[in-house]
Image (spheres, rainbow, N blue to C red):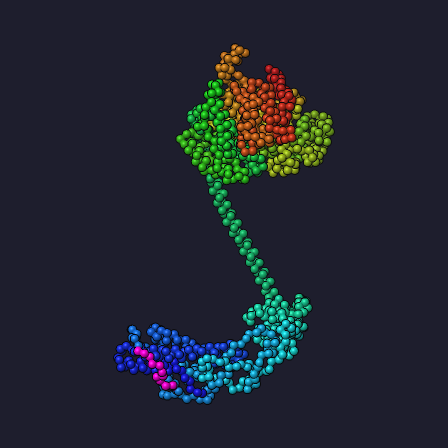
């Protein structure tokens, strides 16, 4: 190998030696800059030559990569050389940089002095200052140059450089370069370019492209290099004519093995030799796949294989769909693959079958254990949650029970205080808190239509301000508009004008009454809560009531008591003029009222109570029919219903087939003999057999909207319990309602009484006429006081009402009065009576059943002409009132328009008589109440019917009559004659009774 020459490296070594000598001579003084500039210039020239050589080799290797394996060592050498050249250029550009100085020190042993300031250099003389070095520099020699043996030279230049036999800065020249750089035109990959490419055969039989030496304007540095190629180059096979790349090769695989000597396989391998590694890996996957499934024959399409190879990587396992996509007979292969157990027919099939069996069994065992574990986990979770809920519910129930017990104890304590101070409280300044709450059970409240409106039918409670010492706080279940509030303010302002007889004396009593609406009515719109519960959850309203009653005597008058009434009373710290909720709910039921009547020894209709199953009902009804053959209709009443909604009836006289036969059997025996079981046993058996079908076909509920069929009524009847009682055996029957008060001191009073008006049904009350005219007041007072005593003995307190029925018995022709129902709450009739007394300044005498009104001076003057003998000017009045008037067409007009229409037709109130409307709410406006007051009963009935007729005509059109009870028998104007005849008959009957008594 020839010696290598590196001018840049020699210059750097000479610069080092010279700097060393200068340092010795000058002892640390500055260095001549001209010497450094000369060394730098010579180094730059050498670097340019080196870069040009590297660039030439790069062009050659770019176009002839086919021969890269023969010159790989030279490329690595050039890469290292290029890196060192770049570093030298960087050093020459900035020799004063600290890192460059360190690099020179480490690699070349040159220590550059610190140059503070560059001096002006003299003119540089060009030329060589040192001779060529034919051996290694002195810095790389230890005892002398090392000889290079022949076996070391065969290992190549790169090995010599790595072993430090050739210095890194040595310049290597190749005597005869194998290739010369030339620009080559790039063509598309077509056959014609391969055929026209000129080839040159090398001395070793290889095929090399034929190039011409390029002509350069400067000396070609490659001529100074001698590149030694390997002596033995493996002979290259002359290329075969290439097939068209668009032709497909079909590679056949038999039993999972590729025939590697097939012509198509060899041609395919030769054609795609550059990417054969990826293709071979993919084919191995296909072979394994086909062996696993024992596929006898598969044909691979090369075109699809090559399309897939571009996306396939060696470290990526192809999917089953990828493998099938390159198979030409894919349908046949798929059919074989889909055969059950095919996987176990291929290679390692027995092992796979055993593995599958084991895996399936283990999976079954694991799944079974997992399911068992999940069931246990679920069960433990359910138990834990149930236990937590149970304990939480138990704590809540315990807390609620303690709270309610505390409320009840406080209720009794306040009740004792109220009883002890009642005489003082009722005559002193006080505040009455009216809460018209209906504390029925949840199912009844939910079934009642417009339950909030049902609780607001007692606006007449405001009239307690008739007593000058009373202020009223009325809790309203509906949000009233300013129009309604203004209307009631005007109505209540009539009292001063009524007393003086001068309409100009109307006053403003807004400071005497307050109408409050709990804010919770908007928070629980669909929960069907009673008013007491809504007030309990309305802290703002509670706080306002506390401020209004602060420092005053106050008590609560509720409706039907509820447990939350006690809670409200506890919050306000005021007593309740009412009954304990449990006692009230026990005796307000139909069965409970029967117990009260039985203990009071008052007459009641024949019947039975506490019926809870169908067999008991059939047996009881059969026996009642046998014992009371004169009763032609039997009533069924649900215990907890109200207002006649839970009532049904059965007419046996017209529908029971054996009824007349039973009457004939009864006539055969005397009364004492008929009572014996053997006498009426055959009739009892026949009646019991007919009753089930008779009830299913002919029993009729009163409220068909609530109970459209007998089956639904029977279900409710048996679930809640009920009574069976007889309907009076008479054509003329009169129902009446008596309101009573048991004061905290124990005194019992009758505060109101009236005869009922039946509009929708003869078994459902729609209004009353006051005072009652159907029963002797003494008889009525005696019965009511007995019932009051029985109620007081059972802890009943406050207001309650009794329903009675009177008729003339057809056999004895004597009047009979039966007690039929008991309601332990403040009634609508009582509220309307309070309003009637307020606007007339009158007095209703319960003992004599007279409604007396003191006359003004103007009225007394006109009255004196007719009755000059009376010392006191007192006039009797009658009133017809109804809280159940409804008309669907009322929703289309406002109340102000309705009042103007009534005023235009002369419907109004003047001189303590006339008509007053009670307005409940102003959103739906389909219900209202009306009171008509007059001097005689017949005139009042005519006025009441006329008012309804006028209102109906004004708000209805011929084609829009609406849904109403204005025109029902007893109400409508066209039936007013019949209704008056009925009332006259009642009065005549009463007169006959009184005459017979005298």
Q: Residue at x 61, y 71 (%)?
A: 305
Across and down, in percent, residue 961 comes to 63, 30
Which of the image's four quarters has the C terminus?
A: top right
**Is 694 on the left or on the right of 397, as rendered?**
right
424 or 192: which is nearer to us?
192
**141 over 662 or under it: above or below:** below
Residue at position x 26%, y 80% from top? 26
Question: Residue 863, image x and y in percent?
Answer: 53, 13
Residue 930 is drawn in which quadrant?
A: top right
125 falls in the magenta region: yes
From the top left corner, tell me how far across and down residue 19 is, in percent. 31, 80
Quarter occupied by residue 49: bottom left
Residue 991 part of the magenta segment = no
Q: Secondary structure of the magenta portion, mostly?
A: loop
Residue 608 lies in quadrant:
top right
Q: Is residue 48 visible?
A: yes
Can you give x and y, in whole percent of width and height, for residue 3 in the image?
A: 42, 86
Whether residue 757 is visible, yes or no, is: no
Q: Is residue 520 above or below residue 785?
A: below
Q: Residue at x 42, y 26 (%)?
A: 429
- Which quadrant is the N terminus positioned in? bottom left
Q: Is residue 521 above or below residue 470?
A: below
Tell me where the magenta segment starts and ends, as one range: 122-133
Count how many numbered circles sit on residues in the image: 0
């Amino acid at each position: 190998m020839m010696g290598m020459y590196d001018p840049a490296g020699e210059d750097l070594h000479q610069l080092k030696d010279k700097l060393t000598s200068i340092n010795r001579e000058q002892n640390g003084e500055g260095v001549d800059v001209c010497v450094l500039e000369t060394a730098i210039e010579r180094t730059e020239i050498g670097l340019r030559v080196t870069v040009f050589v590297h660039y030439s080799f790069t062009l050659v290797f770019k176009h002839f990569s086919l021969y890269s394996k023969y010159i790989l060592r030279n490329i690595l050498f050039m890469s290292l050389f290029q890196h060192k050249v770049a570093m030298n250029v960087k050093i020459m550009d900035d020799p004063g940089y600290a890192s460059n100085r360190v690099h020179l020190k480490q690699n070349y042993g040159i220590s550059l002095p610190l140059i503070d300031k560059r001096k002006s250099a003299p003119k540089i003389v060009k030329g060589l200052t040192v001779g060529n070095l034919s051996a290694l520099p002195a810095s790389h020699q230890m005892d002398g140059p090392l000889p290079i043996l022949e076996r070391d030279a065969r290992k190549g230049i790169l090995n010599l450089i790595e072993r430090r036999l050739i210095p890194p800065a040595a310049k290597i020249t190749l005597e005869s370069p194998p290739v010369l750089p030339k620009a080559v035109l790039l063509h598309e990959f077509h056959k014609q370019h391969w055929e026209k490419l000129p080839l040159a055969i090398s001395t070793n039989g290889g095929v090399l492209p034929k190039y011409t030496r390029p002509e350069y304007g400067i000396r070609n540095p490659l001529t100074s290099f001698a590149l030694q190629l390997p002596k033995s180059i493996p002979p290259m096979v002359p290329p075969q004519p290439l097939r068209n790349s668009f032709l497909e090769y079909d590679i056949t695989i038999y039993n999972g093995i590729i025939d590697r000597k097939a012509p198509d396989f060899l041609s395919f391998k030769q054609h795609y030799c550059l990417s054969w590694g990826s293709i071979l890996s993919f084919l191995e996957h296909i072979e394994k796949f086909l062996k696993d499934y024992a596929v006898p024959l598969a044909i691979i399409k090369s075109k699809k294989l090559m399309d897939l190879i571009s996306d396939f990587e060696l470290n990526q396992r192809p999917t089953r769909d990828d493998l099938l996509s390159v198979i030409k007979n894919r349908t046949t292969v798929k059919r074989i693959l889909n055969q059950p157990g095919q996987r176990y027919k291929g290679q390692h099939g027995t092992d796979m079958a055993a593995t599958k069996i084991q895996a399936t069994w283990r999976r079954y065992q694991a799944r079974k254990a997992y399911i068992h574990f999940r069931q246990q986990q679920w069960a433990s979770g359910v138990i834990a949650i149930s236990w937590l809920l149970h304990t939480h519910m138990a704590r809540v129930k315990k807390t609620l029970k303690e709270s309610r017990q505390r409320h009840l104890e406080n209720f009794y304590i306040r009740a004792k205080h109220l009883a002890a101070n009642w005489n003082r409280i009722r005559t002193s300044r006080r505040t009455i808190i009216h809460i018209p709450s209906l504390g029925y059970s949840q199912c009844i409240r939910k079934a009642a239509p417009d339950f909030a409106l049902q609780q607001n039918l007692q606006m007449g409670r405001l009239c307690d301000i008739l007593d000058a010492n009373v202020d009223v706080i009325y809790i309203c279940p509906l949000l009233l508009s300013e129009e309604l509030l203004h209307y009631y303010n005007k109505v209540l302002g009539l009292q001063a004008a009524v007393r003086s007889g001068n309409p100009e004396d109307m006053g403003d009593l807004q400071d005497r009454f307050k109408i409050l609406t709990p804010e919770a009515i908007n928070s629980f719109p669909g929960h069907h809560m009673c008013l007491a519960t809504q007030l309990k959850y309305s802290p703002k309203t509670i706080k306002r009531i506390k401020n209004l009653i602060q420092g005053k005597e106050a008590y609560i008058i509720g409706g039907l008591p509820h447990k939350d009434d006690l809670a409200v009373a506890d919050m306000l710290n005021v007593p309740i003029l009412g009954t304990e909720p449990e006692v009230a709910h026990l005796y307000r039921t139909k069965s409970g009222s029967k117990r009260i009547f039985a203990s009071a020894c008052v007459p009641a209709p024949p019947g039975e109570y506490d019926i809870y199953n169908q067999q008991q009902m059939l047996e009881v009804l059969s026996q009642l029919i046998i014992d009371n053959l004169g009763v032609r209709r039997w009533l069924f009443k649900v215990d907890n219903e109200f207002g006649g909604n839970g009532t049904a009836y059965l007419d046996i006289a017209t529908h029971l087939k054996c009824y007349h036969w039973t009457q004939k059997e009864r006539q055969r025996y005397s009364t004492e003999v008929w009572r014996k079981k053997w006498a009426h046993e055959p009739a009892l058996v026949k009646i019991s057999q007919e009753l089930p079908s008779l009830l299913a076909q002919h029993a009729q509920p009163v409220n068909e909207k609530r109970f459209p069929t007998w089956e639904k009524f029977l279900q409710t009847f048996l679930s809640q319990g009920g009574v069976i009682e007889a309907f009076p055996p008479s054509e003329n029957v009169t129902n009446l309602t008596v309101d009573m008060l048991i004061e905290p001191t124990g005194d019992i009073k009758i505060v109101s009484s009236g005869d009922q008006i039946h509009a929708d049904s003869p078994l459902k009350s729609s209004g009353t006429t006051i005072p009652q005219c159907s029963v002797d007041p003494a008889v009525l007072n005696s019965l009511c006081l007995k019932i009051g005593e029985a109620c007081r003995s059972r802890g009943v307190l406050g207001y309650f009402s009794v329903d009675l029925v009177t008729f003339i018995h057809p056999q004895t022709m004597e009047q009979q009065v039966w007690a039929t129902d008991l309601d332990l709450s403040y009634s609508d009739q009582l509220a309307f009576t309070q309003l009637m007394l307020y606007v007339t300044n009158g007095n209703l005498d319960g003992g004599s059943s007279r409604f007396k009104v003191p006359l003004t001076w103007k009225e007394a003057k006109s009255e004196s002409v007719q009755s000059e003998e009376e010392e006191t000017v007192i006039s009797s009045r009658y009133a017809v009132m109804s809280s159940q008037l409804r008309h669907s067409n009322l929703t289309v007009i406002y109340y102000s328009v309705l009042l103007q229409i009534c005023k235009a037709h002369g419907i109004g109130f003047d001189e303590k008589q006339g008509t007053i409307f009670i307005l409940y709410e102003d959103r739906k406006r389909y219900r209202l109440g009306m009171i008509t007051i007059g001097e005689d009963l017949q005139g009042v009935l005519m006025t009441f019917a006329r008012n309804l007729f006028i209102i109906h005509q004004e708000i209805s059109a011929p084609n829009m009559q609406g849904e109403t009870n204005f025109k029902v028998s007893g109400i409508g104007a066209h039936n007013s004659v019949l209704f008056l005849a009925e009332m006259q008959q009642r009065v005549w009957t009463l007169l006959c009774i009184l005459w017979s008594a005298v």
